[in-house]
Image: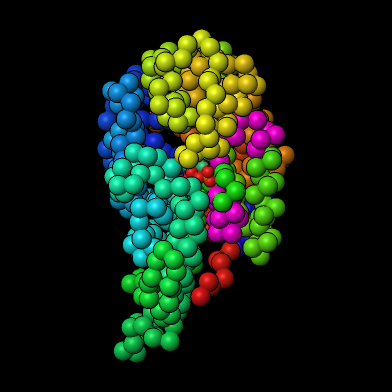
Amino acid sequence: MTGTNSGQMKLGAFLMAGGHHIAAWRHPDAIANAGVNIDHFIELARMAEAAKFDMVFVEDAAAIRERDPDLASQGARSTMFEPLSLLAALAVNTSHIGLVATASTTYNEPYGLARAFASLDQLSGGRSGWNLVTSASELEAENFVSSGLRPHAQRYERAEEFAGAAAALWDGVDSDAHTISDGVYADPAKLHPVDHHGKHFTLTGILDSQRSPQGRPIMVQAGASEAGKNLAARTADVVFTAAQTIEEAQAYYADLKSRMPAFGRKPDDLKILPGISPIVANSQSEARAKYEALQDLIPDEVGVALLASYLSIKDLSQYPLDGPLPEMPATDGIQSRQQLIVDQARRENLNIRQSARKFAGARGHWQLIGTPMQIADRLEERFLAKAADGFNIMGAYFPGALKDFIDLVLPELRRRGLFRTEYEGKTLRGNLGLSIPERAV
Ligand SMILES: Cc1cc2nc3c(=O)[nH]c(=O)nc-3n(C[C@H](O)[C@H](O)[C@H](O)COP(=O)(O)O)c2cc1C
């Protein structure tokens, strides 16, 4: 399967309640209770599937997202389906599109998660993916451990062992183990109990499932630290990232891919999809007006509180909003996003209010405002410049912004031969053009 569709972009649709823009829920066309509205998600998944996207992606934090009262009162992100249950519902309402759910290695155990993703793979005919995260939020830590957020290094040490144990469980069942013929249901010689005795986990079982139709669920990651990039280079099939400039995106791409040979992998075994938030219209001025209409919906205090939460500054509003970002200690949260905000503020000479307003659109991901031609040009440029293998499309508000991208930008990408017109395979792995990994056990 490898290489059947190389030369074309891979596309994810990053779903998020009413949209990725912090004020999306206040948009006149938004669905106010989108986070817990199953019909809304079915519509988005079907729309992305009709457009031949590789996957839909659902992020997660096992906690309410907003502690700050300014954010909490405006927090459309404070209600959301748990991703694996949501994707199980989407599995039976779609037939081709990949279904990627986020789940944490810090607050789960390998058997439970490996089983849940194997189950989603069976439900969907081989379309499941796991966005493996180590959970950087203190709000999540408060729901699980009394000692608070575990240090970054400890979280990744556990994640490394977790990923190995999950792979061993998926590989413990041969693809021809369940013959279900001649009075034999499963051939015991083709079931391989896991024998894992590590620092964090002990397990000795076999998964109560058949082999995944795609060998193993697709592994997704978004690590940006040294530990995160090494784990991704060793185990990930797809990586999400946030980058503003083409240089940043190229540097991340080259860095991550150059780590792969040390783990016996080829650079093409991993697809890097930076997040982008496109706001598209038939003229530049119309696109700009759409963007400004969204920006006008952001109360300053909400934008500043969101920025503060990513900078790990308790109260950013104590600083003058027209002044520069203050000095800040390194965070134990998402270090790369803190750096991205600081770099962007320096590069574009932004004060706190301006930084906050920019960040509120797509939380540090690349925002592209323009005509279909302009947006296709920029995407093509990054794709050809080895800054991306495709993109994770983050609609500013749903369904409108995703629909605009599909209706206006995709035809232009297709005209250039940069995106598929039909699915190549039946599984997510097949559509990504990736081969089934060697057995880990
Ligand atoms: C597109 C994208 C989506 C992400 N989704 C989640 C998520 O759902 N849950 C989460 O805890 N972290 C999420 N993250 C954060 C990453 O998992 C990771 O913690 C972050 O990029 C920093 O990398 P590091 O932990 O290696 O420092 C996401 C990151 C990106 C770029």
Left-right relation of 354 to 108 = right
Which residue lies at the image location 43% right of the left edge and 77% below the top edge? 195
Which residue lies at the image location 38% right of the left edge and 20% below the top edge? 302
The figure's colour scheme reads rainbow
Q: Position of residue 365 (x, y in %)?
A: 54, 32
Q: Is residue 26 above or below residue 98?
A: above
Evaluate whether residue 121 shows in this view. yes
The verdict on residue 84 being magenta is no
Which residue lies at the image location 59% right of the left edge and 54% below the top edge? 230
The verdict on residue 243 being magenta is yes
36 and 341: which is toward the camera = 341
Task: Locate residue 346: give its quadrant.
Answer: top right
Q: Position of residue 145 (x, y in %)?
A: 31, 49
Q: Residue furthest bottom?
A: 182
332 and 236: which is toward the camera = 332
294 and 168: which is toward the camera = 168
- The quadrant in which the N terminus is found is bottom right
Task: Locate residue 143: give its quadrant.
Answer: top left
Q: Is residue 336 above or below residue 212?
A: above
